[in-house]
Amino acid sequence: MEKQWGVYIHIPFCRQKCFYCDFPSFAGRERYESDYIDALCREMAVQGALYRGKWGRPATVYMGGGTPSILPFELMEKLLQKLQAVFGISEKSGQNHGKPLEFTVECNPGTIAPAYLKMLHEHGVNRLSFGVQTFDDALLKRIGRIHTGAQAGEAMNLAREAGFQNVSMDLIYGLPGETQAMLLYDLETMISLQPEHISIYGLQLEEGTAFAKMQAMGKLHLPDEDAVEKMYDTMTSFLPQHGYARYEISNFAKPGFESRHNLSYWQDVPYLGLGAAAHSYLEGQRYENEKEISLYIEGIRSGKSVRHEEEPATRAITMEEFAFLALRTAQGIDKRHFAEKFGVPLEKIYGDALKKLERQGLLTEDGDFVHLTEFGMKYGNAAFEEFLL
């Protein structure tokens, strides 16, 4: 039976750990790369084949990290060949639910070469996501990035030359020492490169990161709240004026170039996670793979399961999660989908919250959908709190 579903593949290696990053990624573990790709291919052969047999070919594949593009050429090619064999992916992959498969690979602008990009394209990758973060070289150093602003621009040229017509770029605002003028420079530089998709995030200080430690020691000098709010207002007005529609709290795209893989996370679509620390959402249950690279490799080699079931969600938690994730999108909560999934109308569970948030101007109803207003997207946490049962 054909079903809409996605695949996420985690590559946990990076050249240098960025100072803000709390993702499961590691610098200095190159010695594991070959064994890791062997283990990943074995996990894919079993789990990937199982779900492809159940649901048909996936609609989306996303390879993230870490930095997938630091994998040596031969190892990336081996992984892509396995992906093609297991999931039926090719450069001209057929239709799935009326659309060609979307296959994204994350890249660091400082780690790519023309031959590498050509190899990705020839093996069915049709979307790239560049972690740019800023074009300011001093800021890039300050946040622990290994590329320069010039390399970010060159990465886009190389991607186009390799045949990529769907490229996303990430920005972060509210960085240490950043000013309004610096953000505007980043936005203007980015749109001059004409990516099809832009993700833009406010800096978050996550526990365990280098930045969190610097903050605790009083050594991190961040823009104040008013300055960060002004940056938010700048980017949310600037990008739509330049042809990028906001379709999720942190994501903007030219028409038709919304990330289908990311949308699937917010729209209750199942996905299979492969690799160390990868998460899966399958048949209503969430799972997490073994985080530690060496333990993941050992587990796969010995035929043990590396997938741990997360605590089964109660009905109330599942409803909250459904609402939170859907509200991140411009479309919002599909009332029909909610009623089909839970057997009860949205209003019966959240009637008081909906009325309160509408009165506050944070939420609005539009036919079968309930979604945040622009004001609501800015103060999303206040809205999300009302959906806690």
Image (spheres, helix red, strand yellow):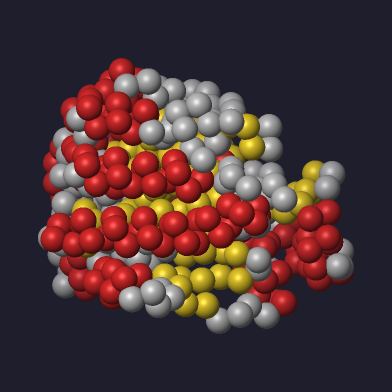
Asked if residue 347 lies left or right of residue 380, the reply is right
Asked if residue 320 lies left or right of residue 301, the reply is right
Q: Is residue 300 visible?
A: yes
User: Toward which corner of the image does residue 283 lie, by quadrant?
Assistant: bottom right
**382 over 265 or under it: above or below:** below
**Residue lying at 40% horizontally and 77% vertically, measured from the top left:** 304
In-front residue for pair 171/259? 259
Asked if residue 159 lies left or right of residue 148, the reply is right
Asked if residue 179 lies left or right of residue 195, the reply is left
Q: Is residue 379 visible?
A: no
Q: Residue furthest top?
A: 161
Q: Position of residue 291 (x, y in %)?
A: 34, 71
**Residue lying at 55% horizontally and 81% vertically, measured from the top left:** 311
In-front residue for pair 297/106? 297
Q: Position of residue 382 (x, y in %)?
A: 59, 64
**Residue lying at 83% horizontally and 47% vertically, measured from the top left:** 368
Q: Position of residue 40 (x, y in %)?
A: 35, 59
**268 over 305 or under it: above or below:** above
Q: Position of residue 389 (x, y in %)?
A: 70, 77
In-front residue for pair 378/137? 137
Total labels: the figure holds 0
**Residue lying at 65% horizontally and 75% vertically, measured from the top left:** 317
**212 over 92 or under it: above or below:** below
